[in-house]
Structures are given as structure tokens and as C-alpha cells.
Amino acid sequence: MTIATVAAITLAGSAIGSPSGHVIDLTRPVVTKDLTRSALGADAEDFCINGVEFANLLGPRRHEFARHLREGGVKVLRFATMLRYDFAGADATLKLARLTTGADDMEALWYEWFDPELFFSFCRENDINIIAMVNLPLFYDVDTDRALDGLLFPEACARNAARFVQWVADHDYADTVVAWELGNETYGYSRKCEPEVLARLNAVCARAMKAVDPGIKIAVPGVAMGAGWKGATTEEGRGYQELTEFSARTLAALGRDARLIDYLILHLYGQNEAYNASGFGPVNFHRDLIAPNPNCRHMRFIVTEWRYVAHPTTGDQTFLWGALHHGKVTADLLADPRVDWIAGIHSLNMLGGLLFVSNGEIWHLWEPENVRIPDPLRKPRMALGPYAVVLRWLNEAVERCPLLVGTGDTGGGGSQARDCGRLTTRSAEGSSGSPR
């Protein structure tokens, strides 16, 4: 039995089982999910906010970096600009970061600016898909050579977003970008603007970007609280309620412009319970943000940040707690018929993550107690993290068995398609073949 077969069984197992009391009709096999739009990867946020090492990896250590990502089976990276990177150049980035962080020099920004050509060409060379991000609401405006707030200057922000799409098209990287994020967690502006203001900004940016390339997929952030927070009177509970309401009202304010948006972005963080960040996440988002809004029911989900616990400990570095629990979450998400790209273990070098890098002195590794971990060999090198093993298993399963097939649910009651029972290969003609 191959590793990919074991992973396929794991993925199918995550989808097996209908609600209690439902009857599975074994005579009615149906395709519940086409996995050709699904793959696992990582949030490469470190490229932009703590990325001195990673900027180096795209240059002098490029081949070593590529080999490790291939060995880890990485198929998608999120290029999160996070209001601290602008592809226009180091000066543009500095002006944006000054507005964002108040920093006044590049050293204070924690990273070394790099030519975006390095990142995009690296991904194309290594068959890695990209989830790109445009800076929003804060952005660098090339026309005025200033950093501006898109909530006040939406049309200028839209021009900035469109020029990034144009840059990607001009450099022949359009086929590597599977989705465009409109900013990061912009629901955090709930106390700065009304939902209608953010909705208008999302709409004008999406329209300008699709005018450049109508084929792109655009994603907007959202947040949805777990059922346990409904009615909670604690400060944390009220905060989740406020953000969820703001997200729902922002989507509703789009009106028919919601057709410009293809994906809703999920950031899933478990609340120190092993399975909290798994299938419950999509359920909450669908319940609070999609189902109440007919204009949004075409939207699918991408996951660009997640950890199975919100506040990890040193124990999360281990294979058991890092790899196995992370693998459980990703298997659940791959099996969910609403979820496509999953590029979000947060982040590339964090905890039970994908890749750890030594510069010959210390390991570039996010450690819960912020302890600097020395490299006793004093040799620049890389090491795959524990999650890389499971990630490769699951990505190989998806490649070999790209159709998730269920049996049909005769229980009625509008249940979700969660009774998937097997994976199949696709023939050259596009039909399903024998199960693996």
C-alpha cells in the first residue's frame, strides 16, 4: 500500500458518515467534490513581515529552498503583503509601512524588500500555485507617491489593486494565481467605518481588477463565530458577535455587486481544542454569512490562515500534536464540498509547520515563548517540519484521486453532503474510474 493510498483512505474517512439516523443509499454514487481546485500549502506571511531569511531563500538559497518545498509536497503559497510590502519597490513599501506601523526606517520593518519577480518565478518554476493579496484598505498610491487609506480614497485604491493584476499579467504569471485576497482581516475595521463603506471599497477594487483580467478569482475576508459565542456576555464573546455582524452586513451591502466576489476567506483558529478548527469553521461561515444572503450563495471558501489551536504551546512542535492534529484539520477541509484552496497553516515556519531554516547561528522558527533556538552545528541548513509529512500524503492523494465520491443521503432534511465514501481517479475523457 503506497503512502498516497493511505492518505486517500484518510481523506475519504474524513468525509464518511451521515447524520444520525440517516440511511445511506449505496446504489446512488455521486461526485461530492472535484478536488482539482484543492491543494494544501502554507501562509508565506514571513516573506513580508519577518522575512530577512526568506528573502535570502528566494535568491542565493533558491535551489535548496525549492528542494525542501518539493519534498514537503507544497502546492500553494499565500503571498500575504499584510500592508508591509508593495511590489512597486522598497521606497513604496517604506511609505506604506510608515503609515501602517509608524516605523521610519527599513530596519524597523523587520524584513528585507525583495523583487516580486523572485517569488512569482520561484512558484512557477516549482509548480506552486499562489494566493496573492492586494493592500487594502491602506495602500501605496503610485500617482501621488503617498500611502493612502482606501476607505477615504476608494477609486485610487482600486487603481492600485488593478496595477498589481496588470503586473502579474504583463509578467506572464496569471496562470499561477488561483485567487486574489482583498486585504487581510478587514473586518477588523468594524469600529472605523460602516459596513457599506468597506463593501463599496471591495466592489470598486474587484471591478477594476476584473477589468484587467476577467478570469481572476477574488476573495474577501469574513469572520463567523462559533455557536458557543452566541449570546455570550463576556468581552471576548461580544467581540466575536460584533465582528460576525459586521462581516454579514458588509456582504449584504454589496448587493448585486456580490457577483464580483468568488471566494469568502476563512481564518480558522481552534480555541485550544484539537478539533475546534476543523469542519465547524465552514459550517459557521455558511450559517452566518452565506445562507442569509441570496447574493452570496455562489461563493466558495478558501482557507488562508489556520492552526488547530489559537494559542499554541511548545508541545505543538511534536509530531503527535503538530502533524496529526494538523492533518485531521486539513483532511476535514479537503473533504468539505465548499472549500477549495487551503494555503493557511499559519505560518510557513510556525510550530508543527512545514519548514525551519537555520542561518548558521539560530533557527528561524516561531517559538511560543520567543526563545531563540541556537543551531549547534553552526551550519546554514533547512529542515522539514512535522506537518510536511502529512501535507505531502494528502496532496499526493488529491493528485492521484481528484474526485471525492459519495453514496447519496436518503435521510432528507437538507443535510450537507458529508457522507462521502471513496475517492476515484479521473479518466482521460473526464469520467470517474475505479476507486483507489
Image: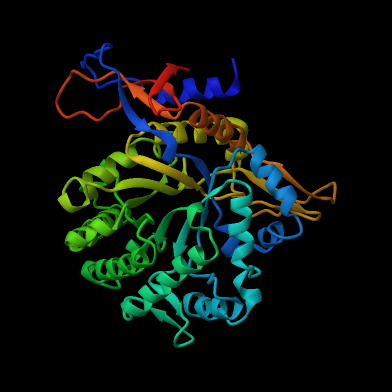
Residue 369 is at least partly visible in this image: no
Q: Residue furthest bottom?
A: 144
Q: Is residue 66 left or right of residue 393?
A: right
Q: Is residue 317 above or below residue 111?
A: above
Q: Is residue 37 left or right of residue 170?
A: left
Q: Is residue 159 above or below residue 124?
A: below
Q: Quadrant of the N terminus?
A: top right
Question: Picture quarter containing residue 213?
Answer: bottom left
Q: Is residue 374 left or right of residue 422?
A: right
Q: Residue at x 23, y 20 (%)?
A: 409
Give residue 296's position: percent from left, percent from top: 22, 51
Q: Residue at x 45, y 31 (%)?
A: 331
Question: Picture quarter containing residue 138?
Answer: bottom left
Q: Is residue 406 left or right of residue 347?
A: left
Give residue 297's position: percent from left, percent from top: 21, 47
Give residue 159's position: percent from left, percent from top: 39, 76
Residue placed most toward the observer, 434 or 180: 434
Question: Picture quarter containing residue 260?
Answer: bottom left
Q: Is residue 41 above or below residue 418?
A: below
Residue 389 is at least partly visible in this image: yes
Q: Count the marks.
A: 0
Snapshot colouring: rainbow
